[in-house]
Image (cartoon, grey):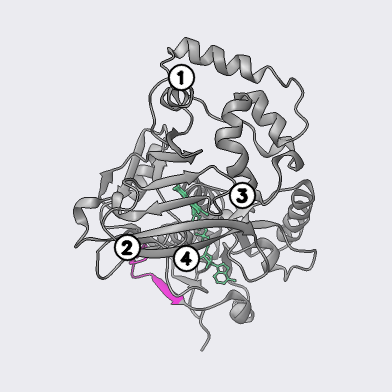
């Protein structure tokens, strides 16, 4: 008997995209088999509780839910209660600490004097005049926020993120650098900024709990695709991997995480970015500050984050998206069009960086417009 016997739909990948499709299909009466090569569901947004401290750890980097999309917020609210959480990020630069993204508080601390919103705007605009026609990332950043802020907050951080001098990165790498001329230091502007009350792990379990969904973990598509025969498939793994990299591999950045268990309070907040080139990590996350009232005991867990180019076998996190990558991706999309029973989706299937609300939105839209109607036709 095959893994996929009696399935109306096979979903490859139990991340937010795959779970949204699976839940929608199951709730519409279809039998769904979801596989994931990892030992857990939730994809990159997966979290678990540390046994001794009860701290919620986000295994693949910190995830903060934010959206302006009411449909997405309402949909996810079927599976979780929320608690309000507005992320505030700090940046360590030159031995001092500043609020991020750059706002009036950052500028006043940096210049060591109070500037009104109008004075700060004028100062940034004057500094940005230095470069009119940017030819690389460094010049583009200077043309947006001026050299002083660029050198303090962007240069070293970007160099570490890309392992490349910003002068050697294309100007198109950044479209804008947000500067707020108010003291609003929230990291996101969105209307809904929340965390799932019982954690992301509990949210995902509830999404997958429908009796029409069968979950198979530690199962790689490559090892069972021959059993799928004519079934409809939603594939949320890497698009180049689906085609065995036959046209070449798409470029990704990956992250390494270094966890440390310590006593007390390490940094007094959730996230500190490290802007100086001399510090090897890009940021430190201290998870207990997300919900300090739920933490047991006096221990804390911090996670240092390091960025590097992904090799085969590394977790792909951020698409590099050079023009060669874009052309290669377009060629894979051409191949994907010929797979009449397979829908590609999610951040890996679409070779793009997407926040969680964007992933859920695109899955809901794909289900309504393409996958749901096809399942209707395929109904046994
Ligand atoms: C460091 C970091 C921080 C982030 N922080 C935020 C944040 O604060 N807020 C926010 O909204 N978003 C954040 N995101 C984005 C968020 O992670 C994504 O939006 C979301 O995880 C994408 O869901 P997905 O289902 O498309 O992909 P994934 O979560 O990657 O799920 C894909 C699943 O497919 C499985 N898979 C792949 N290939 C195969 C195969 N061959 N066989 C079987 N299974 C396979 C994988 O194991 C994985 O579980 C962050 C991303 C990163 C990298």
Residue 142 appearing in the image: yes
Rendered location of residue 205, percent (x, y): 34, 65
In-image side of 131 versus 375 (left or right): right
Which range is magenta?
A: 204-216
Kindly tell me whether mark 4's CB lies below 8 Å from ligand 1.
yes
In-image side of 14 versus 340 (left or right): left
Kindly tell me whether mark 3's CB lies below 8 Å from ligand 1.
no
Residue beneath label 2, please? 262
Location of residue 216 by image quarter: bottom left
The reply to whether callout 1 and callout 4 are in contact (CB within 8 Å) is: no
Say what secondary structure mark 4 lies in: loop
Q: Between residues 200 and 138, which one lies in front from this camera angle?
A: 138
Residue beneath label 3, please? 160
Q: Residue at x 59, y 26 (%)?
A: 148
The reply to whether callout 2 and callout 3 are in contact (CB within 8 Å) is: no
Q: Which mark is residue 181?
A: 1
């Amino acid at each position: 008997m095959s893994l996929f016997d009696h399935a109306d739909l096979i979903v490859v990948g139990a991340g937010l995209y795959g779970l949204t499709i699976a839940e929608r299909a199951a709730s519409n009466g279809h039998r769904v088999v979801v596989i994931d090569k990892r030992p857990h569901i939730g994809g990159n947004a997966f979290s678990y509780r540390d046994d001794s401290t009860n701290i919620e750890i986000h295994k693949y980097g910190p995830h903060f839910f934010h959206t302006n999309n009411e449909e997405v917020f309402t949909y996810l609210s079927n599976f979780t209660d929320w608690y309000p959480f507005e992320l505030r990020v700090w940046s360590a630069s030159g031995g001092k600490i500043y609020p991020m993204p750059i706002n009036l508080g950052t500028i006043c601390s940096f210049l060591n004097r109070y500037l009104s919103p109008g004075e700060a705007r004028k100062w940034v605009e004057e500094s940005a005049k230095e470069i009119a026609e940017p030819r690389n990332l460094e010049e583009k950043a200077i043309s947006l926020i001026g050299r002083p802020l660029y050198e303090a907050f962007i240069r070293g951080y970007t160099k570490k993120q890309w392992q490349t001098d910003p002068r050697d990165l294309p100007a198109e790498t950044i479209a804008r650098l947000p500067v707020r001329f108010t003291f609003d230091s929230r990291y996101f502007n969105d209307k809904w900024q929340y965390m799932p009350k019982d954690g992301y792990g509990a949210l995902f379990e509830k999404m997958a709990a429908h009796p029409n969904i069968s979950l198979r973990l530690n199962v790689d598509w490559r090892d069972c695709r021959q059993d799928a025969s004519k079934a409809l498939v939603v594939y949320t793994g890497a698009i180049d991997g689906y085609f065995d990299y036959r046209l070449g591999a798409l470029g990704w950045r990956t992250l390494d995480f270094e966890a440390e268990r310590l006593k007390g309070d390490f940094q007094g907040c959730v996230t500190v970015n490290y802007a100086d080139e001399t510090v090897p990590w890009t940021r430190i996350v201290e998870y207990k500050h997300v919900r300090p009232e739920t933490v047991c005991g006096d221990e804390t867990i911090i996670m240092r984050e390091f960025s590097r180019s992904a090799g085969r076998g590394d977790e792909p996190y951020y698409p590099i998206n050079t023009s060669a990558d874009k052309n290669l991706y377009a060629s894979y999309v051409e191949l994907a069009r010929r797979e009449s029973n397979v829908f590609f989706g999610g951040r890996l299937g679409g070779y793009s960086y997407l926040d969680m609300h964007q992933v859920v939105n695109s899955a809901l839209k794909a289900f309504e417009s393409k996958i749901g109607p096809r399942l209707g036709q395929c109904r046994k």
